[in-house]
Amino acid sequence: MPKKEEKKADNKMEKIISLAKRRGFVFPGSEIYGGLANSWDFGPLGHLLKQNIKKAWWKFFVQERSDMVPLDTAIIMNPKVWEASGHLKNFSDPLVDCKSCKKRFRADHLLDARAAEPGYNKEKPIDWKKIKCPDCGGELTEVRNFNLMFKTFMGPVEDAASVVYLRPETAGGMFVNFKNIQGVTRRRLPFGIAQIGKNFRNEITPGNFIFRTREFEIGEFEYFIHPNAWEKTFEMWLGEIKRWWKDIMQVNLDNLVWREIPDGERAHYSKRTVDIEYKYPFGVKELHGIAYRTDFDLKRHQEVSGQDISYTDPETGEKFLPHIIEPTFGIERMLLVTLLEAYHEEDAPTAEEGETEKRVVMKFPRYLAPIQVAILPLSKKKELSTVAEDLANSLRKDFMIDYDETQSIGKRYRRQDEIGTPYCVTVDFESLEDKAVTVRDRDTMAQERVKMDELIGYLKEKLGC
Ligand code: GAP
């Protein structure tokens, strides 16, 4: 990236991180104790935004479909689950330490950085010994593998028999419940099992704000199919994922990169994987993915558990282990993309005729906005605030409301723009006479007079809820 663009990009991340903290989207974790490296807490607005993203995801991928069933499984599972899935043996990253400054790095990231250097010759193998610590130039240790699962003990005795792990992905819970779910729901293939939940990975190099953290949520589903349907099902899900980003998340599709993972780079069990990458200010990196996992998972769980978890087709009588297509989405990465896409700086008119000032406006899709409607009485006088408070209370059943009566109306509009509130409702002295209020649109800044008793219907239509 040219230097000037790099600076601009850093600047955007800095602005997002600063806004996120200042306005209560994301706080550094355990801040009053000096923080805990790369842990983050979601503040009032961040929590609401995350909830809205999860709700939209659930509605689109689960609720609106007839072929999906929900699930919510335990974070701590029998360690045999991780033996069967291969996580105990293979869920590791290559690690190197700097012998001088003692910093740790992912060896593959250092190689990626080297490969991105100008003049890099892809045909010539990289001499690992020539790679030095990117921070101090010191010599690096040999590469060793580091398992990313967080370990703990179950019960009072801390011995080898009581070791358990915090789940590194939600998928395991869905594989081991396939038989239960198919039995109780009597579903026929194809059908999917979906869940959203917390996951834990002891990442060697977390960073880039909430992009890579050690605890994060995944929304994913396992879609069970007959093996001969995998190609068309994969295409169907790719289409649905495109629809998700275009219509629901309203992302600029030019910012997405659909990367077909070539042979040799895919996980050993996958016959096809597409990573959906995003052009973050810090580079093009994974946002989420979709993989055809064959029957690897059910086969392994059948082998290790000794239970028959096969499926019998009620029409043909064919008995087989279903194959799986797995679309998976990191919730925090979707939230980061939502913040990046929403951030705009624009000129806005001030109260002074012909003058403008800069406004920061978060143009969230309306149904994702943490606060949907702000009620702003023009004055703090009791006669106005009584009407405005009653109005706010009448709207709370349907919308997330903010009530703000401090400072000038211009400043209050700017505050609401900065948190992405789609509609500001101003109650003024005329409202006492005409029983109407002024509704201001976040994006166009256009204002419209609406009768108070028609306000709920008006806002519902505008917000698409
Ligand atoms: N069951 C498949 C699975 O877990 P994954 O690619 O390892 O796949 C799924 O993880 C998604 O979780 C990723 O595509 C990414 O969006 C998100 N993710 C993975 N590691 C993460 C981390 N350390 N911090 C934040 N999000 C992460």
Image (cartoon, grey):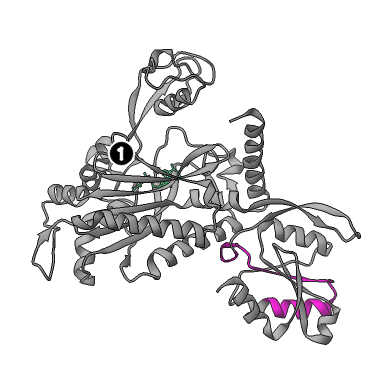
Q: Horizontal placement of 299 versus 153: left or right?
A: left
- Tag 1: Cα neighbours inside 10 Å, few (<14), some, or many (≥20)? some
- Quarter of the image where one finds residue 222: bottom left
Q: Position of residue 366 (x, y in %)?
A: 60, 65
Of residue 5 and residue 201, the one placed in the foreground of this image is 5
Q: How many marks?
A: 1
| Of the pair 460 and 273, the residue shown nearer to us | 273
Kindly identify the residue that appears in the image at 67 percent across and 43 percent down.
15
- Identify the secondary structure beneath mark 1: loop
Q: Quadrant of the N terminus?
A: top right
Q: Is residue 298 left or right of residue 123?
A: left
Reply yes or no: does residue 375 show up in magenta: yes
Residue 95 in the image: above or below residue 257: above
Q: Quadrant of the C terminus?
A: bottom right
Q: Quadrant of residue 353?
A: bottom right
Please state the extent of the stretch shown in magenta in the rendering: 366-392
The answer to whether residue 159 shows anywhere in this view is no
* Residue picked out by circle 1: 266
Q: Quadrant of ligand 1?
A: top left
Relative image position of residue 169 (x, y in whole percent): 34, 48
Magenta highlight on residue 351: no
Amino acid on which disc 1 is placed: Arg
Image coordinates for residue 208, horizontal then vertical, percent: 54, 38
The furthest residue to the right? 353
Q: Nearer the viewer, residue 91 or 224?
A: 224
